[in-house]
Image: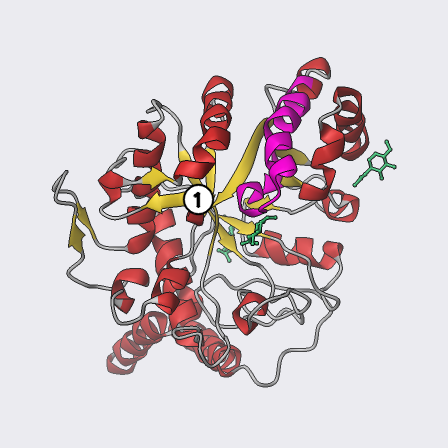
Amino acid sequence: MTSFSFFKSLFFFLLIISDSFMQINCLSCGINYGQIANNLPSPSRVSVLIRSMNVTNIKLYDANPNVLLAFSQSNVEFVIGLGNENLQNMTNPSKAQNWIQQHVLPYLSQTKITCINVGNEVLNSNNTQMMLNLLPSMRNVHTALVNLGLDRLISVATAFSFNILENSYPPSSGSFKQDLIQYIQPLVEFLDEMKSPFLINAYPFFAYRDNPNEVPLNYALFQPNQGLVDPNTNLHYDNMLYAQMDAVYAAIKVLGFTNIEVRVSETGWPSKGDSDEIGATIQNAKLYNGNLLRRIEEKQGTPGKPLVPIDVYVFALFNEDLKNGPASERNYGLYYPNGSPVYNIGLQGYLPQMALPSKSNVLSFNFVVWIVVTYLIFAWEL
Ligand SMILES: *[C@@H]1O[C@H](CO)[C@@H](O)[C@H](O)[C@H]1NC(C)=O
Ligand SMILES: *[C@@H]1O[C@H](CO)[C@@H](O)[C@H](O)[C@H]1NC(C)=O
Ligand SMILES: *[C@@H]1O[C@H](CO)[C@@H](O)[C@H](O)[C@H]1NC(C)=O
């Protein structure tokens, strides 16, 4: 009897300390599956990984047929991308319809595609022609969906960079850059008419990296901190991402719209960066993404929209070795290309046909715990 209760205490102690029993069930979170790399596993192996993680939403930057086929008969919902390089063609309605017929229609009976993201951060392209082409492209894609009877299944959106904002603090004073309003106003009208979300790529990491003496790290990382109070609304913000989202709501309101939902099409934190990229560490990335996933799981809203659960796509599934720019750009992944986690946030997945990574202390620790727990369950039942 005594030894049994000792075993039971030890058992529960191990349950508490082992991350492998604190699974995050990613039932409403999304992940960006970027593929600017030359060393990623095949889409069919990735589909096993994603399914084992219980991730239900994936965002692609293209409409890669190998990926869409690999997710046949799965419950995963896809946002697919129509890249900036296609926008010129999409201003032609018949080319837009051809694109849908070629890249979407053949996969729909097997794979759930729920949104087409037309262009990525086009308003940051500094390409006026492309910026002018964005709305006609979105309209033509929508019209093609209507013609094919798909407009109720598939929505049309476009992802904006957070730096289209002129002002973001306090959140209630959020506003768009004056010189971009001529483009944003008609886009927002279209999103409102389509009941499509306003997608924003938001990275508190950038704010921290660029201003580490002003921005409290814990505020950026969703860690306990005193937070900030918006003097106009008296709303209390305990993290920067929610403040950024509410700043976007405020900027949209200035344009006259209050019924458009703001969703986060990208956010994340790099686990590594150049020496001048303050804050890009494994520890911070683990805190940011782990805390974020917990808040998604709790279906939290922002202080300004408490009843609208945040809808977020984490960036990104893998580190992408061919991305340009500072080292951080190549280190946003939750996973290394070999399928081992960069850090453990309770989202373990399983990538088939790979040797166990030998360097991961986390995995070997969990493995030892697993052996001990299995033994204890066995002993308990004797
Ligand atoms: C995924 O969901 C299944 C069924 O709901 C559950 O048994 C499994 O533990 C979950 N896996 C993870 C990694 O959360
Ligand atoms: C645009 O369309 C033309 C033909 O209609 C095609 O040859 C070209 O590859 C397309 N451009 C892109 C970027 O897909
Ligand atoms: C944008 O384009 C203009 C004119 O082509 C150029 O002068 C300016 O430097 C560019 N800005 C950026 C940020 O690339």
Residue under the point 58% across and 59% down: 317
* Numbered marks: total: 1
Whether residue 316 sits left or right of residue 100 in the image: it is: left
- What main secondary structure does the magenta stretch of the protein show? helix
Hey, what amino acid is under mark 1? Ile
| Residue 116 shown in magenta | yes
Q: Secondary structure at mark 1?
A: helix
| Residue 328 shown in magenta | no
Whether residue 4 sits left or right of residue 356 in the image: it is: left
Q: Is residue 42 above or below residue 343?
A: above
Quadrant that contains the N terminus: bottom left
* Front-most of residues 230 and 340: 230
Quadrant that contains the C terminus: bottom left
* Front-most of residues 147 and 360: 147
Measuring from the top left, give residue 314's x and y in whole percent: 49, 53
Residue 28 in view, yes or no: no
Query: Around disc 1, counting alpha carbons within 10 Å, would you say few (fewer than 14), some (14 to 19), or many (20 or more)?
Result: many
Q: Which residue is mark 1?
A: 164
Residue 96 in view, yes or no: yes
- Whether the residue carrying mark 1 lies under 8 Å from ligand 3 is answered with no
Measuring from the top left, give residue 185's x and y in whole percent: 45, 27
Measuring from the top left, give residue 296's x and y in whole percent: 38, 48
Which range of residues does the magenta coloring cover? 115-143
* Front-most of residues 244 and 267: 244
- In which image quadrant can residue 36 be found? bottom right
Q: Ligand 2 falls in which quarter? A: top right
Whether residue 27 sits left or right of residue 95 in the image: it is: left
Measuring from the top left, give residue 204's x and y in whole percent: 37, 58
Residue under the point 43% across and 76% down: 281
Residue under the point 28% across and 33% down: 307
